[in-house]
Image (cartoon, helix red, strand yellow):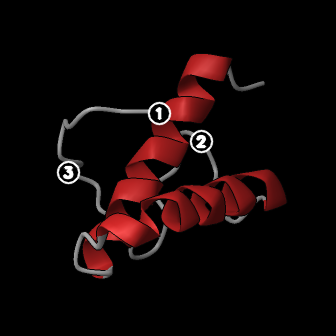
Amino acid sequence: MVSQHERIEHISRRARELWKKEGHAPDREQACWDKAVEEFESGKLTAGREQPGADAAGDGGADR
């Protein structure tokens, strides 16, 4: 089972990746977060396992 902290970490990392791909557009931040949540909850984004195309480095930026 994934802790709430781990869930947020993985969603945050994926949301930042999606947002970066969209050119850091300020009006897309929430949409990227929502997509990352959807991916996590559907099993497309799995905690503890690197996803294909995922940014493994992360950016260490502020999380939600």
Helix, strand or loop at mark 2: loop
Question: Residue type at mark 1?
Answer: Glu
Tell me the residue that label 1 is attached to. Answer: 9
Check disc 3: other Cα within 10 Å, few if <14, some if 14-19, many if 20+.
Answer: few
Q: Which badge, 3 or 2, is on the more N-terminal residue? A: 2
Q: Are marks 1 and 2 in contact (CB under 8 Å)?
A: yes
Residue 29, by quadrant, is bottom left
User: In whole angstroms, how far apart are the C-alphas of marks 1 and 2?
Assistant: 9 Å
Question: Residue type at mark 3?
Answer: Ala
Helix, strand or loop at mark 3: loop
* Residue that appears at 67% across and 53% down: 37
* Residue that appears at 29% across and 73% down: 25
Instruction: State whether residue 27 is above or below residue 61.
Output: below
> Furthest residue to the bottom?
22
Q: Percent position (x, y) of residue 4? A: 66, 20
* Image quarter in which the N terminus is found: top right
